Amino acid sequence: MKLQRVVILGGSGFVGRSIANRLSRAGIDLLVPTRRRARAAQVLLLPTVEAVEADIHDPATLRGLLKGADAVINLIGVLHSRSGAPYGPDFARAHVELPRQLVAACREAGVRRLIHVSALGADANGPSEYQRSKAAGETEIRAAGEALDWTILRPSVVFGREDNFLNLFAGLTRLFPVLPLAGAGTRFQPVYVEDVAEVVWRSLNDTAAIGQTWELAGPQVYTLRELVSYVSELTGKRRPILPLSDGLAMLQARLMELAPKPLMSRDNVRSMQADNVASGTPLPFGLAPTPLEAVAPGYIGLSNCRGRYYPMRTRARRGQP
């Protein structure tokens, strides 16, 4: 089937914008639902994108959005939720109930192709509500069986120019002389946002992706402490890192939860009890993952000479031995 129209749920977010850009370059018509159209300002600049204000959690609205589409990509996810068992209501709504409604809407609208973006570490028995809810959402997708041509993608933490991961630590290094760090020894395998977008595009066009669950990761594993140290070096403000014990990490997170927009929650700390590392090949389709060091200096280190040197070196094809 030739792809002509794709709906991207979460298309105005960080990962969604890269996916929209990749699909738009291929000439695909894209529909991006959003709570407020102003949030989709960046994707609206793309020539094949239409953004509409809509409540995707309303089943009738969701069915209407999918009408006439050839495929749908689900990127909806939240990092924080009120607590509950086995997961809180906000996790349940975004990660479990929406996938269930999406499967039903696809069936009713006649849309067979579905790309569901979950998370590396999704686990029904995971230590965090986030991980358990992500696993439950995957179960809802798989329950569609052969009625839908689904693919589940599990990215590690995603980095790129507008990420909320490396940029967060860059901001903290500029503000504080010492960095108290929860989960300092937790291992991560960050994946480049453009690599994620490429996998989504290829999955849409390759029938071998149907029924697959693929992990998406970068070429190298780092501890969180190593990542924060690297970021602080790029900002030109090397900071002492103070690893926190489990008890202190939970206390720090509890205090952060009091903020209107918390940077950290106790559930985030529980997620870091498990390493966020791929179990096999970092990317499908034989793709070579992009090293973090080839990209991060171009958007984190621009305020210092060393940071400006890295992207120039990469463009000259001397970034890797």
Image: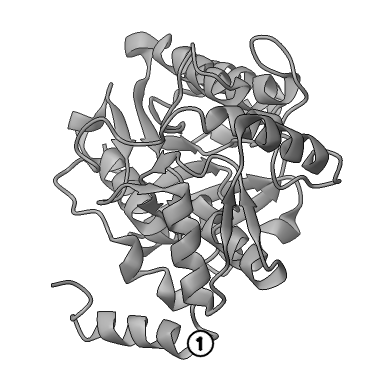
Given residues 37 and 313, the one toward you in this image is 313
Tell me which amino acid carries mark 1. Answer: Asn
Left or right: where 66 falls relative to 311: right
Colouring scheme applied when the structure was drawn: one colour
Label count reads 1
Percent x, y for residue 77?
59, 35
Depicted 213 relative to depicted 159: above or below = above
Percent x, y for residue 279?
26, 30
Residue 272 visible in the displayed image: yes
Percent x, y for residue 53?
73, 47
* Residue 314 image-quadrant placement: bottom left
Percent x, y for residue 287?
18, 50
Label 1: element kind: loop
* Residue 189 image-quadrant placement: top left
**Residue at screen point 52% across, 15% down:** 136
Q: Which residue is mark 1?
A: 304
Left or right: where 226 falls relative to 181: left
Would you call the spot at circle 1 few (<14 residues within 10 Å), some (14-19), or many (20 or more)?
A: some
**Residue at screen point 57% across, 63% down:** 240
In the rendered image, the quadrant that contains the N terminus is: top left
